[in-house]
Amino acid sequence: MTKLAILGGEPLRGDPYPSWPVHDEADVEAVAAVVRSGNWGGYPYPGPETKRFLDAFTAMNGGRYGVAMMNGTITMEVALRAAGIGWGDEVIVPAYTFQATAAAPMMAGAIPVLADIDRDTFCISPSAVKAAITERTRAIIPVHVASQMADMDAIMAIADAHNLIVIEDAAHAHGAVWDGMSAGTIGHFGSFSMQSTKSMTAGEGGILLCQSQEHAWLAESIIDCGRPHDPDETIYTLGFNYRMTELQAALLNVGIQRFPAQFDQREKSADYLDEALSEIEGLRVLPRDSRLHRRSVYSYTFAIDPEAFGATNRVVARALFAEGIPCSSGYDPMYRYDLFQPGLSRLPVPSAFPEYFDYEGLDLPVVERISGREGLWLEESVFRAGEEGVNDVAAALAKVQEALERDPSLADALAAQ
Ligand SMILES: Cc1ncc(COP(=O)(O)O)c(C=O)c1O
């Protein structure tokens, strides 16, 4: 009988998982070279390091046009602006995502309309998207959550039928492949984050892939204070300084070389974990869609059946974390964020369109269930620690489950803590 670490026992895993980002002298040298060059910033856009990274990243993804920015939130704002989407337009986003997916439309003056998710992927549900379409809908932002992808076939079919722009939020999905196409190259735009925790990182950074040259020119103008970027020098637009710096691009040029091996390692470990978890009763391994050819393991999501397992996701996540497993219960439903409450938010969009932000009647049962009861997330570091790192996850889950079986009152006691 081993006492749970959350109750003061010995943690199952004593050693920390490997830290992120991985770095060595190559990163130091790359940054030092930019420092010595004196060309630190993003002007004139694109600088040589930025251009080199854009070429490598678009080639890696089979994308058409890439635009480099400061982060993976403004990438989505810029995509909306480049597509002419703004004040009062409706943009459908999942209610289960990082706040940036809904904040970006508001920064462009558009209204985020929250939709339910799919139980098997935790990504936006195509049928919920369909049900949310009105005559004011202009765009959909599907998010590829953790290591899953949204059903892009269904989403593109809906978008085609209703003449909507699709911006893939691929902040988690560098290198993922859906039916032969890279994440971020299926919609009209693909938005990537290079923030510290992401699978390819410069600390901060963002790339927007664009399908059309015109969208790319517009996006380049918007991030470069409105300067024209088309060869005829005719496209002038309202712009800002959202450029990526050369220091960021230099780090990305090193990171992209390590990326394929890291990607393979994480994916292989995730496959191994699928098998290990399928042996544990009360857990649900998310089914693998046959169109998800490569999965990018930014995080790993799975689900518990609280009745069979003996506790809800929040209790299990806290118990696992105490055992040394970097685990969480994932996102809260977006409609609970203060940011989106017209009474609390002083942002122009919720104030101007309060009817959209009255979530009283909103019924998103899958978001409620995944967020409040079933969903569990493991950090990517688990997947860079070999089979032993994965085995520890399974062993910690078994330890928690055994303790819950032994003492059924434990779940309530831990939930009340
Ligand atoms: C799903 C999702 N979208 C967008 C972003 C925003 O990226 P950034 O932090 O680079 O602005 C994040 C970042 O965590 C994210 O997880």
Image: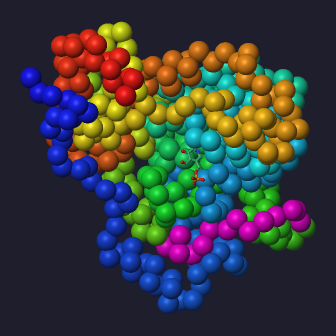
137 w.r.t. 50: above or below: above
Image position, residue 225 (x, y; %): 80, 69
Q: Tell which of 416 and 199 is nearer to you.
A: 416
Q: Which residues are magenta?
A: 235-250
403 w.r.t. 343: above or below: above
297 relative position to 239: left or right: left
290 w.r.t. 327: above or below: above
Residue at 68% in and 54% down: 74
Quadrant containing the C terminus in the rendered view? top left
17 relative position to 295: left or right: left
Residue 130 at least partly seen: no
Image position, residue 266 (x, y; %): 32, 44
Q: Tell which of 347 and 416 is nearer to you.
A: 416
Q: Quadrant of residue 47?
A: bottom right
Residue at 58% in and 41% down: 98
398 w.r.t. 407: above or below: below
Name the outermost residue toward the left: 1
Residue at 51% in and 18% down: 369
